[in-house]
Every structure is written in C-alpha cells, then in structure tokens.
Amino acid sequence: MKLTSITVRQWVPAPPKKVFDVWMDPKSPGSFWHGGHRVIYNPVVGGMFYVAVKHEGKIWPHFGRFLKVQRPRLAEYTWMSPATQGVESVVAVKFTPRKKGTLVTLKHSGLPADKMGRQHKDGWTWILSMLAQTMAAKK
C-alpha cells in the first residue's frame, strides 16, 4: 500500500503553554479529544487513547498510543481509524512561539495515499481552525 503524509499549519492567538494545554485537554473545546462520543485518554508516553467521533451519521473509532508528550512543544501519537485501513500512522503536533501567539504544525504521516487518507487534511484543518477560534474567544 502506498502511504503519504499531510501537514497543516495554523496560527493561534495564545502562547504555546496555553495552546498545548487546551489541545491536550479532552474537556476543553478546541481539542480534538473534546466532544467525542466516547473518550478513553491517558496522555503519557506509552499511554493509550480511544476516541469515538460522530461524523456523517456514523461513529468513527480512533485509537493509538502516545509516543512523546513534551509540554509545551510537542505531542506525538500513533493513530489508527477505519480511514487508515489498519495502518498505524503517526500524528506529530508542534507548538512554536510566533508573533504574539503560537504556530501549530500538525504532521500526519503514514496515511494511505487514497481518498480517505487524504481527507485527513480537511479534518485536521477544521480541527486546528476550531482550536484557533476557541483560543481567540478566551482572550
């Protein structure tokens, strides 16, 4: 199976520590983990996660394990879902100080190079825009 990577960037109007903390908090709007139909979450190196997301009338299970948790710079975890077709992909989220805020760079590597794999770019773009909107509203 041919694999691909996607990268999405979003400037967020808050310092890296605040952005990282929101991203990693399943109780915080703006986090991927927030609002899941069911969430099991242990954000430590080697810790596992499971998030069931409702989308287009279906429940999509996402699961993996944390590889790196380096507050406030980096969160990295494996990622599997029906859209990865059993492939264990990797999500790396970097938080870099920039212009009175944070540049969030999300790289998702090892995705199947098909329509479902490429659609992750749209999903992550939307999620990062929600993070930016949440942080702007908190100002």
Image (spheres, grey):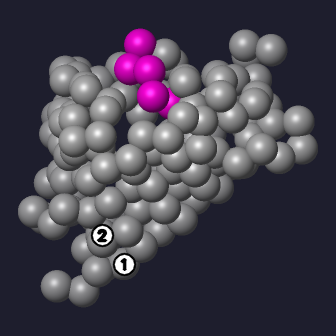
Identify the disc placed on residue 111: 2
The residue located at (18%, 51%) in the rendering is 81
Q: In this view of the protein, can residue 129 be seen by the observer?
A: yes
Q: Is residue 111 left or right of residue 30?
A: left
The rendered magenta stretch, by its main secondary structure, is classed as: loop
Cα separation, mark 2 vs mark 1, equals 5 Å
Q: Height in image: 58 above or below 8?
A: above
The residue located at (81%, 36%) in the rendering is 101
Q: Position of residue 93 (x, y in %)?
A: 51, 50
Q: Height in image: 24 above or below 64?
A: above
On the rendered image, what quadrant is the C terminus found in? top right
Circle 1 SS class: strand
Extreme residue in the right direction: 99
Extreme residue in the left direction: 86
Residue bearing the label numbered 1 = 4
Q: Position of residue 55 (x, y in %)?
A: 28, 37
The residue located at (45%, 44%) in the rendering is 75
The residue located at (88%, 36%) in the rendering is 100
Q: In this view of the protein, can residue 123 be seen by the observer?
A: no
On the rendered image, what quadrant is the N terminus found in? bottom left
Q: Are the residues flagged by discs 2 and 1 in contact, CB closer than 8 Å?
A: yes
The amino acid type found where label 1 is placed reads Thr
Q: Height in image: 47 above or below 118?
A: above
- N-terminal label among 2 and 1: 1
Magenta residue check for 24: yes
The amino acid type found where label 2 is placed reads Leu
Q: Height in image: 111 above or below 30?
A: below
